[in-house]
Amino acid sequence: MRILIAEDDVMLADGLQYALRRSGFAVDCVTNGTEADSALDANEFDLLILDIGLPRKSGYEVLRRLRGKDSHLPVLILTALDAVNERVRGLDLGADDYLGKPFELAELAARVRALTRRGMAGSPTLIRHGMLSYDQVGRVARLGGEPIELSAREIGLLEIFLQRAGRMVSKDQLVSHLCEWGEEVSSNAIEVYVHRLRKKLEPGGVSIVTVRGLGYSLEKPVSQ
């Protein structure tokens, strides 16, 4: 999962980036509203953490423009402007959640997990795919009830495939959701990550097939 943080407090942004990366998310940061607009136009993200008091263009303007493009990207407003009228304004413009500063990182992490769950198929806490189950809160996968040891990159891949079960996912799409700016991930590296994940899922009859020249697809279970 890839998250964009739009926050002009560099120390706060660095802390958020560090905490979210430790949870296995790919995280990019911008420091003003104009950069946020450009990043949202040029990249695919799974969540936007948006400060309202951004320089050059306010978070409200960024949010208004985003929703004006009919984007359903989950947005968490993070700001010191915690008066009721400010919360109402942000929610009316299309924000999905609102967290006032100061805050605890544990609460932020819980809200991030809740919002990213909404983008996944059916939005349940526990996703089932044949013998595979995936707990979106704990980010734990199991085959036949037994936990599978997955790296952060493999978890990211699994989430993408579960979001698009039965549909083709290109290598470019995988890179855009898994990788941060400046992170070089080759086509060969993606093949290696997919191969490792495939080997861990195959014992449970869960199949990731290669669509030659196009990408990959997580086959739907026969019962589905």
Image (spheres, rainbow, N blue to C red):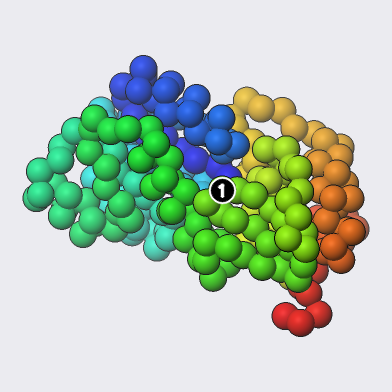
Query: Which residue is tagged 1?
Result: 138
Q: Nearer the viewer, residue 82 or 9?
A: 82
- Secondary structure beneath dot 1 equals loop
Residue at left offset 22%, top offset 38%? 100
Indicate left or right for 125 with 37 as reference: right
User: For residue 144, what is the image quadrant?
Assistant: bottom right
Indicate left or right for 87 with 95 as reference: left
Residue 38 seen in this snapshot: no
Q: Position of residue 59 (x, y in %)?
A: 27, 40
96 up-or-down from 220: above or below:
above
Residue 138 seen in this snapshot: yes
Q: Position of residue 114 (x, y in %)?
A: 43, 53
63 up-or-down from 205: above or below:
above
Indicate left or right for 197 with 4 as reference: right
Residue at left offset 85%, top offset 62%? 204
Figure quadrant of the C terminus: bottom right
Residue at left offset 81%, top offset 48%? 197
- The kind of residue tagged 1 is Gly
Q: Position of residue 126 (x, y in %)?
A: 58, 63
Residue farthest front in this picture:
145
